[in-house]
Image: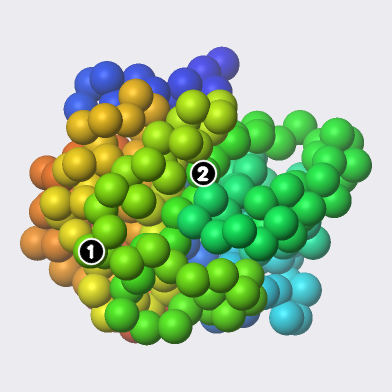
Amino acid sequence: MQTMYAHIIQAKKDNQKLLAVLIDPDKMGVDHIPEFFKKVQQSIITHVFVGGSTDAEKKMEMVVKTIKQHTTLPVLIFPGSHEQITEAADGILFLSLLSGRNPKYLIEQQVQSVEKLMHTNLEIIPTGYILIDGGIKTAVQRVSETLPISQHNVEAILHTALAGQFSGKQLIYLEAGSGAKKMVAAEIIQEVSSKLQIPLIVGGGIRSKKQLNEIYEAGADLVVIGTAFEENEDFLVELKS
Protein backbone atom coordinates (compact mmCIF):
# COMPACT_ATOMS: atom_id res chain seq x y z
CA MET A 1 0.00 0.00 0.00
CA GLN A 2 1.30 3.46 -0.94
CA THR A 3 2.18 5.63 2.05
CA MET A 4 0.64 9.07 2.44
CA TYR A 5 4.03 10.67 1.88
CA ALA A 6 4.61 8.64 -1.29
CA HIS A 7 1.23 9.85 -2.52
CA ILE A 8 2.21 13.48 -1.87
CA ILE A 9 5.48 12.94 -3.74
CA GLN A 10 3.65 11.33 -6.67
CA ALA A 11 1.11 14.15 -6.74
CA LYS A 12 3.98 16.66 -6.92
CA LYS A 13 5.51 14.77 -9.84
CA ASP A 14 2.13 14.68 -11.59
CA ASN A 15 1.44 18.35 -10.82
CA GLN A 16 -1.69 17.29 -8.94
CA LYS A 17 -2.55 19.94 -6.38
CA LEU A 18 -3.66 18.78 -2.92
CA LEU A 19 -5.94 20.51 -0.41
CA ALA A 20 -6.30 19.84 3.30
CA VAL A 21 -9.04 20.99 5.65
CA LEU A 22 -7.68 21.84 9.11
CA ILE A 23 -9.96 20.85 11.99
CA ASP A 24 -9.25 22.48 15.35
CA PRO A 25 -10.68 20.31 18.18
CA ASP A 26 -11.24 23.45 20.25
CA LYS A 27 -13.48 24.91 17.53
CA MET A 28 -15.25 21.95 15.91
CA GLY A 29 -18.03 20.37 17.93
CA VAL A 30 -18.14 16.58 17.68
CA ASP A 31 -21.87 16.70 16.96
CA HIS A 32 -21.25 18.90 13.92
CA ILE A 33 -18.67 16.62 12.29
CA PRO A 34 -21.14 14.38 10.34
CA GLU A 35 -22.84 17.36 8.68
CA PHE A 36 -19.56 19.14 7.98
CA PHE A 37 -17.97 16.10 6.37
CA LYS A 38 -20.89 15.58 4.01
CA LYS A 39 -19.73 18.83 2.42
CA VAL A 40 -16.06 17.83 2.65
CA GLN A 41 -16.76 14.58 0.80
CA GLN A 42 -18.32 16.53 -2.09
CA SER A 43 -15.44 19.00 -2.34
CA ILE A 44 -11.91 18.82 -3.74
CA ILE A 45 -10.44 18.22 -0.26
CA THR A 46 -7.79 15.47 -0.37
CA HIS A 47 -6.52 15.42 3.24
CA VAL A 48 -7.74 16.15 6.75
CA PHE A 49 -5.42 17.77 9.28
CA VAL A 50 -6.50 17.77 12.92
CA GLY A 51 -4.88 19.86 15.63
CA GLY A 52 -4.32 23.31 17.02
CA SER A 53 -2.08 25.35 19.23
CA THR A 54 -4.00 24.05 22.23
CA ASP A 55 -6.46 21.28 22.99
CA ALA A 56 -8.00 22.82 26.08
CA GLU A 57 -10.86 20.35 26.39
CA LYS A 58 -8.78 17.26 25.49
CA LYS A 59 -11.08 16.41 22.59
CA MET A 60 -8.39 15.40 20.09
CA GLU A 61 -8.93 11.64 20.15
CA MET A 62 -12.72 11.90 20.15
CA VAL A 63 -12.67 14.35 17.24
CA VAL A 64 -10.30 12.15 15.19
CA LYS A 65 -12.33 9.00 15.84
CA THR A 66 -15.53 10.75 14.83
CA ILE A 67 -13.95 12.14 11.66
CA LYS A 68 -12.73 8.66 10.71
CA GLN A 69 -16.33 7.45 10.88
CA HIS A 70 -17.38 9.98 8.26
CA THR A 71 -14.57 10.09 5.69
CA THR A 72 -12.13 7.82 3.89
CA LEU A 73 -9.70 10.69 3.37
CA PRO A 74 -6.31 10.38 5.11
CA VAL A 75 -6.35 11.99 8.56
CA LEU A 76 -3.08 13.54 9.78
CA ILE A 77 -2.36 14.99 13.21
CA PHE A 78 -1.17 18.60 13.07
CA PRO A 79 0.06 18.72 16.68
CA GLY A 80 0.41 21.73 18.92
CA SER A 81 2.10 19.50 21.50
CA HIS A 82 2.98 15.87 22.22
CA GLU A 83 -0.28 15.59 24.17
CA GLN A 84 -2.29 15.75 20.94
CA ILE A 85 -1.04 12.43 19.60
CA THR A 86 -3.67 9.75 19.04
CA GLU A 87 -3.31 6.43 17.23
CA ALA A 88 -6.83 6.90 15.88
CA ALA A 89 -5.34 9.01 13.04
CA ASP A 90 -3.49 7.71 9.99
CA GLY A 91 -0.35 9.76 10.40
CA ILE A 92 1.32 12.76 11.98
CA LEU A 93 3.19 15.79 10.71
CA PHE A 94 6.24 15.57 12.97
CA LEU A 95 6.68 19.31 13.26
CA SER A 96 9.73 21.37 14.14
CA LEU A 97 9.16 25.13 14.41
CA LEU A 98 12.16 26.21 12.33
CA SER A 99 11.28 29.91 12.26
CA GLY A 100 11.67 30.22 16.03
CA ARG A 101 14.51 29.44 18.38
CA ASN A 102 12.50 28.12 21.32
CA PRO A 103 14.01 24.66 22.00
CA LYS A 104 10.64 23.45 23.31
CA TYR A 105 9.25 23.47 19.78
CA LEU A 106 12.46 22.69 17.94
CA ILE A 107 13.18 19.40 19.76
CA GLU A 108 11.75 19.10 23.29
CA GLN A 109 8.13 18.39 22.28
CA GLN A 110 9.45 15.93 19.72
CA VAL A 111 11.48 14.04 22.33
CA GLN A 112 8.47 13.89 24.65
CA SER A 113 6.38 12.39 21.84
CA VAL A 114 8.69 9.47 21.08
CA GLU A 115 7.48 7.01 23.70
CA LYS A 116 3.90 7.35 22.54
CA LEU A 117 4.80 7.25 18.83
CA MET A 118 6.84 4.08 19.29
CA HIS A 119 3.63 2.28 20.27
CA THR A 120 1.48 3.46 17.35
CA ASN A 121 1.24 2.63 13.67
CA LEU A 122 1.06 6.29 12.68
CA GLU A 123 2.93 7.29 9.56
CA ILE A 124 5.44 9.88 10.76
CA ILE A 125 6.32 12.64 8.30
CA PRO A 126 9.16 14.99 9.42
CA THR A 127 7.98 18.52 8.65
CA GLY A 128 9.73 21.87 8.88
CA TYR A 129 7.20 24.45 10.09
CA ILE A 130 7.89 28.11 9.28
CA LEU A 131 5.69 30.82 10.74
CA ILE A 132 5.27 33.81 8.41
CA ASP A 133 3.87 37.19 9.46
CA GLY A 134 0.20 37.21 8.47
CA GLY A 135 -0.65 40.58 9.97
CA ILE A 136 -1.92 39.42 13.37
CA LYS A 137 -0.51 37.84 16.50
CA THR A 138 -1.40 34.18 16.05
CA ALA A 139 -2.01 31.45 18.59
CA VAL A 140 1.19 29.75 17.38
CA GLN A 141 3.17 32.90 18.13
CA ARG A 142 1.61 33.23 21.57
CA VAL A 143 2.01 29.59 22.61
CA SER A 144 5.49 29.05 21.13
CA GLU A 145 6.76 32.45 22.31
CA THR A 146 8.46 32.98 18.96
CA LEU A 147 8.16 35.67 16.32
CA PRO A 148 7.10 35.05 12.71
CA ILE A 149 9.42 35.90 9.85
CA SER A 150 8.53 39.12 8.02
CA GLN A 151 7.19 38.63 4.51
CA HIS A 152 9.69 41.29 3.42
CA ASN A 153 12.58 39.00 4.41
CA VAL A 154 12.27 36.50 1.58
CA GLU A 155 15.89 35.44 1.90
CA ALA A 156 15.43 34.41 5.55
CA ILE A 157 12.31 32.43 4.66
CA LEU A 158 14.10 30.67 1.79
CA HIS A 159 17.19 29.89 3.84
CA THR A 160 15.07 28.55 6.70
CA ALA A 161 13.16 26.31 4.30
CA LEU A 162 16.34 25.00 2.71
CA ALA A 163 17.89 24.42 6.14
CA GLY A 164 14.89 22.25 6.89
CA GLN A 165 15.36 20.30 3.67
CA PHE A 166 19.10 19.91 4.24
CA SER A 167 18.47 18.59 7.75
CA GLY A 168 16.20 15.86 6.47
CA LYS A 169 12.67 17.24 6.64
CA GLN A 170 10.33 15.62 4.13
CA LEU A 171 7.91 18.54 3.94
CA ILE A 172 8.18 22.30 4.41
CA TYR A 173 5.13 24.15 5.72
CA LEU A 174 4.86 27.94 5.26
CA GLU A 175 2.13 29.14 7.65
CA ALA A 176 0.69 32.65 8.00
CA GLY A 177 -1.28 31.46 11.01
CA SER A 178 -4.89 30.80 11.88
CA GLY A 179 -7.06 33.80 11.07
CA ALA A 180 -4.24 35.62 9.27
CA LYS A 181 -5.20 38.90 7.63
CA LYS A 182 -2.89 38.20 4.70
CA MET A 183 -1.74 34.95 3.17
CA VAL A 184 1.85 34.07 2.35
CA ALA A 185 2.72 36.18 -0.71
CA ALA A 186 2.88 34.44 -4.07
CA GLU A 187 6.41 35.75 -4.64
CA ILE A 188 7.60 34.01 -1.46
CA ILE A 189 5.94 30.74 -2.43
CA GLN A 190 7.42 30.94 -5.90
CA GLU A 191 10.92 31.61 -4.60
CA VAL A 192 10.81 28.80 -2.02
CA SER A 193 9.13 26.23 -4.27
CA SER A 194 11.61 26.88 -7.09
CA LYS A 195 14.55 26.04 -4.81
CA LEU A 196 13.07 23.17 -2.74
CA GLN A 197 13.31 19.57 -3.83
CA ILE A 198 10.64 18.40 -1.38
CA PRO A 199 6.90 19.19 -1.31
CA LEU A 200 5.75 22.58 -0.06
CA ILE A 201 2.67 23.11 2.11
CA VAL A 202 1.14 26.59 2.47
CA GLY A 203 -1.58 27.73 4.84
CA GLY A 204 -3.12 30.74 6.56
CA GLY A 205 -5.26 33.65 5.36
CA ILE A 206 -6.82 31.89 2.35
CA ARG A 207 -10.48 32.84 1.96
CA SER A 208 -11.33 32.54 -1.73
CA LYS A 209 -10.95 30.20 -4.66
CA LYS A 210 -8.98 32.93 -6.45
CA GLN A 211 -6.43 33.06 -3.61
CA LEU A 212 -6.26 29.26 -3.59
CA ASN A 213 -5.48 29.18 -7.30
CA GLU A 214 -2.85 31.93 -6.89
CA ILE A 215 -1.06 29.85 -4.28
CA TYR A 216 -1.18 26.74 -6.45
CA GLU A 217 0.14 28.68 -9.45
CA ALA A 218 2.98 30.06 -7.29
CA GLY A 219 4.15 26.52 -6.58
CA ALA A 220 2.44 25.16 -3.44
CA ASP A 221 1.93 21.40 -3.59
CA LEU A 222 -0.56 21.18 -0.73
CA VAL A 223 -2.68 24.02 0.64
CA VAL A 224 -4.27 24.03 4.10
CA ILE A 225 -7.49 25.93 4.87
CA GLY A 226 -9.09 26.12 8.31
CA THR A 227 -10.55 29.45 9.40
CA ALA A 228 -12.31 30.12 6.07
CA PHE A 229 -14.24 26.88 6.40
CA GLU A 230 -15.04 27.61 10.06
CA GLU A 231 -16.42 31.03 9.18
CA ASN A 232 -18.22 30.03 5.99
CA GLU A 233 -18.95 26.38 5.25
CA ASP A 234 -20.42 27.37 1.90
CA PHE A 235 -16.82 27.90 0.81
CA LEU A 236 -16.67 24.11 0.70
CA VAL A 237 -19.56 24.15 -1.76
CA GLU A 238 -17.55 26.46 -4.01
CA LEU A 239 -14.81 23.82 -4.07
CA LYS A 240 -16.93 21.03 -5.53
CA SER A 241 -15.11 18.02 -6.95
Residue 81 appears left or right of 120: left
Whether 201 is drawn above or below 81: the answer is above
53 or 119, which lies in front?
53
The disc placed on residue 152 is 1
Q: Is residue 72 above or below residue 86?
A: above
Amino acid type at image mark 1: His
Q: Nearer the viewer, residue 143 or 231?
A: 143
User: Which residue does the image show at 26% across and 64% down from the upper left?
Assistant: 151
> In the rendered structure, which amino acid carries the disc numbered 2?
Gly
Is 134 placed left or right of 207 in the picture? right
Q: Measured from the top left, where is residue 199 in percent x and y?
A: 37, 33
Q: State the colouring used for the structure image.
A: rainbow
Q: Nearer the viewer, mark 1 or mark 2?
A: 1
Q: Is residue 210 above or below residue 134?
A: above
Q: Quadrant of the N terminus?
A: top right
Instruction: Give the residue pinned by disc 2.
Output: 128
